[in-house]
Amino acid sequence: MAKITKKAAQERINSIRKDLEIHNHNYYVLNAPTISDFEYDMLMQELMGLENMFPEFKTSDSPSQKVGSDLETDSSSLEFVQINHKYPMLSLGNTYNKDELFDFNDRIAKSIQTPYTFSCELKFDGTAICLSYKNGELIRALTRGDGTKGDDVSRNVVNIKSIPQKLTGSGWPEEFEIRGEIFMPFEAFDRLNHEREENEETQFANPRNAASGSLKLQNPLEMRERGLDCVLYHFISDDNPFKTHIDAIEAAASWGLPTSTYSRKAYSIEDAIKYIEYWDEKRKTLPFATDGIVIKVNELDIQRQLGFTSKSPRWATAYKFKPEQACTPLLSIDYQVGRTGAVTPVANLEPVQLSGTVVKRASLHNKDQMDLLDIHIGDYVYVEKGGEIIPKITGIESSKRPLNARRPDFPMTCPDCGATLVRDEEQAKHYCPNIDFCPTQIKGRFVHFGSRKALDILLGDATVDALYQKGYIHTLDDLYNLTKEQLLTLDGWKDKSADNLLESLDKSKSVPFERVLFALGIRHIGETTAKMLATHFKSIDALADATRDDLLEIDEIGEIVADELISYFNDQRHKSIIEKLKSAGLKMAIDENESKKLSDKLQGLSIVISGVFSISREELKQIIESNGGKNVGSVSQKTSFIIAGDNPGPEKIKKAEKLGIKIISEDEFNKMLMQ
Ligand code: IVH
C-alpha cells in the first residue's frame, strides 16, 4: 500500500467505515445493495490494511470487526421476534488471491503439529440460517442477524420443502444446531423477477437478495411460492459425537437434512486450490449462484484448537471468485426519463450470457460516465453484474473499435416532452424540469403511487395511460375524484373492473403514513427513508415544518436529501396536493395504536408462562403478543393454557390442574405456531 500520512489515514478510515455501514444496511437489511460484492470487499480490504498500518485507530465497533447485521434496527417496524443465538453466528475471512491461501495454511501449520485435511465446499450465495433440532424435530430457525441475535423465521422456514421438520434415521444428539444457507436457484429467481416485472414491482438485483427478501416475507404462503432451497454446512452441538466436519455433514445427510453434493476432501492446500480452479470455470454451469469456495479444516479437535477471532473462525476461509464479465457490442443507447425527471442513459447490447442470465441492457448512469469510458456506438463493451438489477458497463475494448463507431450525443432536451434538460452538478445527473407537464413524469408518479409497496392500488401502466389520455388524472389527488361513470368510458372496462379500482382506492385510505410518504414519490425518498422520516417526525406537517438543520441532525439524512425535502415542501403545488390527499382521507400521520403483528394464531387467548425456557421470558412474551395472544401473570378460569418450562411454579401448576387448564411444553407451543 502506498505511503499515507496519519491524518489522511484517519480520515480515510472514517470515511470507509461510514460507507461500509451504509453498504451493510443496503445489503443485509434492505436486500438492495448499490455496489458489487467485489467493490465491497475491496473497501473492506483497504480498511483492514489501514487499520493494520495504524493500529491506534483500531476500534471494536469498526465494520472490520463485526458481522454485518440483517436485523431491522428501527424498533417501530420490528417484524420478527429477535432471539439470542446459543453460539455466535460468525462470518468468514475472505480473499481473492490464491497466495493468501498459502498464508492461511502456513498459519495453521505453525500452531498445529499434527496432520490435518480440508473440506472444500462451494460458497453458496444466499442468506445464512441456523436451524435448531431437539429430539429429532425442528424447533426454531434464526437468521444470522447481527451474529449475536437473529430474527426468528421458523414459520417461514417450514415452507421450504428441503428442510425436514422431523429427522429420519438415527444417531443424532438430543439437541443440535445446523447452519447453512437459504438460496434461490436461478430458475426460481428468473420466474420471480419476471412476475415482478409484469406486476410493475421492483425486481431483485440477484438471487441472494431475492432469497433473504423472501425469507423475511410476512406471509408464509407467499413465501412458499418463491421456490427457496437450502443447503446445510455447519453442525454444532454441546454433545458432538463426530471426529470430523465431513463425518458430521454425512450423518446430517443420512438424517434427511439437505447437504451439498459438491464438497470434496483435500489433503493439502495445493489440492484445495485445484478444487478452486475447477469450480472457477465450472460454476457457470451450476443452477444456482456461488460466489466462491470455502476451505475448512476437517478435524474438529484441530478446529477447536484454532478457535475464532471476533468475526470469523481461524480454521476456515473463503476464496471469492472475481465477478464474471462479458464482452459484447453496444448497439444503441436509450435515454430514459424516470418519474422524478432524471434522464438515464441505458445501453442496448447484443444479447450475451452472464452469471446465469441473458443480458440485453446495461446502465451507463450519466453523461460523465459515458465521457469517462469514451464510449462509442459499435464498441465492444465489458459488462458486469454489480449491486443493481441492471448490469453495468465497466469498460470498453478499444482494440476492437470498428472504423464507423461514433460518439453518442447526450440529448439536450427531454426525449418525451422536449423541455430543455437541466444538469444537477452535485449529482452529475440531467433532469427534465417540466414536472407539471412531462407525460412520462406524470404517469410515472401515478404508477409509483399505486405500486404495491406504496398505496397498493390496482393501477398498472395501461390504466394510468388510459386515465391520463382521457384527461381524468393530472395530479395525484385526482385519483380520489374518479367516478364509476368515468371509469366505464375506458376501453374494455366493465362494472367489475371499475368497482375493483374504486375499492382499492378506498382501501388505500388505511395504508400507514410511512407508505403514503413513500408513495408521494419525493426524489431520493425510498421506502426506508420514508419509514425513518415517518417514525421521526410522526406527521407530514411536522416533516414539512422541519428546517434544513433539523433534517441534518438525523444520522441517515445527508445534504442532498435534506435539500430535496426542503425544496419539495417549499413548493406550493406539492402543498396543495398534500392538502387534497389529506382531505380525501389518506393517512398523513402515524397511527400510534398500530402495532406490527405476525399472525392471529393466538388471537383471544390468555396465556400464562412459568419456569425457565430456552429463550428469555421477555422473548417468549413477545412471541405470544406478536401472534395476537395475551400474556397474563396468574392462572384463572379465563386462562387458555400454560406454557411450562423447566422448574415451573408448583402453585401455578396445581391451580391449572384443579381448573382443568391445559399445560403445554415450550416445544409443543413452538409447534403450534409453526402449523
Ligand atoms: S461455513 C463459522 N460453508 O458465506 C462460519 N459458509 O461469507 C461458518 N456460506 O457466513 C460458515 N456457503 O453464510 C460456510 N459452504 C459454506 C458456505 C458458507 C456459503 C456463507 C455463510 C457465511 C458466509 C461467509
Image (cartoon, rainbow, N blue to C red):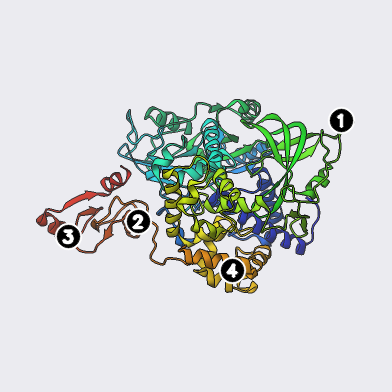
How far apart are the two marked residues, 1 and 4, measured between alpha carbons? 53 Å
Q: For residue 122, say whether it is visible.
A: yes
Number of residues whose C-alpha sits closer than 10 Å to that of mark 1, classed few (under 14), some (14–19) or many (20 or more): few
Q: Nearer the viewer, residue 262 or 338?
A: 338
- The residue wearing badge 2 is 626
Q: Nearer the viewer, mark 1 or mark 4?
A: 4
Residue 359 image offset from top left, x and y in percent: 67, 33
- The residue wearing badge 4 is 575
Q: Tell me, for residue 638, which label it has, or none.
A: 3
Residue 405 image offset from top left, x and y in percent: 86, 34
Q: Which residue is at a point 17% across and 60% down the rendered structure image?
A: 638
Q: Which residue is at a point 57% across and 44% down the rendered structure image?
A: 461
How far apart are the two marked residues, 4 and 2, measured between alpha carbons? 37 Å
The kind of residue on which mark 2 rests is Ser
Q: Secondary structure at mark 4?
A: helix
Specify the quadrant of the image occupied by residue 554.
bottom right
N-terminal of the two: label 1 or label 4?
A: 1
Number of residues whose C-alpha sits closer than 10 Å to that of mark 4, classed few (under 14), some (14–19) or many (20 or more): some
Q: Compared to 389, does 262 lie above or below?
A: above
- The residue wearing badge 1 is 402
The kind of residue on which mark 4 rests is Lys
Q: Nearer the viewer, residue 628 or 490?
A: 490
- Tell whether 44 sits left or right of 263: right
Q: Secondary structure at mark 3?
A: loop
View extreme (right): residue: 403
N-terminal of the two: label 4 or label 2?
A: 4
Mark 2 within 8 Å of ligand 1, using the beta carbon: no
